[in-house]
């Protein structure tokens, strides 16, 4: 795979680039496993298994279930994590634009959407796939550390690198907590 591919695995022998943040819930997942080959795009004609919409998502999330499942499958991310990011970012409003200019369900900034090749960041399917791609890239960069990945999704990877971990921004710290609360509460539904 090319070096810029979001699905590339990182060498497992490398140490974490930053110190581990304190874990308040050691029994809950704090890492995103690295991707493994083969990378298979889900066949749109084959029904997707386990299309579970978390209870906290409500009916507004149902139209996005297939897109979330395809993105989760292809980018090898937990679907519950994608759901949680969408919940915190946009609360399932697909055409929302933030005051900073972030667009769509996963609130992609125009520069990010352009850099990852999205033609229309307000198209829900493209937005979900683009957001999942970006999450996978960040997870790869931060060796699967869920805390740093989410902090980088909110504040940018440069801010996480500059601070050697989760930046001391109240918005980012709150963001990480909220996403993790939704993510962890959705995990048992899959079992």
Image (cartoon, grey):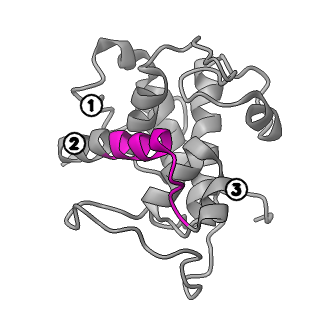
Secondary structure, mark 3, is helix
Q: Residues within 10 Å of mark 1 (few under 14, many from 20)?
A: many
Find disc 1 in the rendering and name its residue. 54
Q: Is residue 174 magenta?
A: yes
Check the image and report above or below for 94 versus 30. above
The label nearer to you, 1 versus 3, is 3
- Residue 178 quadrant: top left
Secondary structure, mark 1, is loop
Q: Earlier in the sequence, mark 3 or mark 2?
A: 3
Check the image and report above or below for 70 versus 23. above
Q: From the image, which quarter does the N terminus lie in?
A: bottom right
The label nearer to you, 3 versus 2, is 3
Find disc 3 in the rendering and name its residue. 158
Separation of residues labelled 1 and 3 (CA atoms): 32 Å
At which x and y percent is residue 62? 36, 18
CB-based contact (under 8 Å), mark 2 and mark 1: yes
Nearest the camera: 129 or 85? 85
Q: Is residue 28 magenta?
A: no
Q: Earlier in the sequence, mark 2 or mark 1?
A: 1
Q: Earlier in the sequence, mark 1 or mark 3?
A: 1
Q: Which mark is residue 185?
A: 2
- Give me the residue at 24% from left, 60% from top: 28
């Amino acid at each position: 795979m090319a070096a810029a591919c979001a699905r590339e695995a990182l060498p497992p022998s490398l140490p974490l680039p930053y110190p581990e943040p304190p874990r308040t819930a050691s029994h809950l997942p704090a890492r995103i496993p690295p991707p493994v080959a083969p990378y298979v795009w889900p066949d749109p004609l084959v029904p997707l298994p386990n299309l579970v919409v978390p209870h906290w998502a409500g009916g507004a999330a149902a139209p996005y279930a297939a897109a979330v499942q395809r993105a989760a499958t292809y980018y090898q991310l937990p679907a519950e994590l994608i759901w949680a990011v969408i919940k915190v970012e946009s609360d399932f409003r697909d055409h929302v634009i933030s005051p900073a200019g972030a667009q769509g369900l996963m609130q992609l900034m125009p520069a990010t959407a352009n850099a990852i090749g999205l033609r229309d960041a307000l198209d829900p399917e493209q937005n979900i796939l683009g957001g999942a791609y970006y999450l996978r890239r960040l997870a790869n960069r931060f060796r699967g550390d869920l805390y740093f990945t989410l902090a980088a999704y909110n504040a940018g990877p440069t801010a996480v690198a500059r601070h050697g971990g989760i930046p001391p921004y109240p918005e980012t710290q709150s963001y990480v907590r909220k996403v993790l609360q939704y993510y962890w509460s959705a995990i048992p539904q899959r079992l």
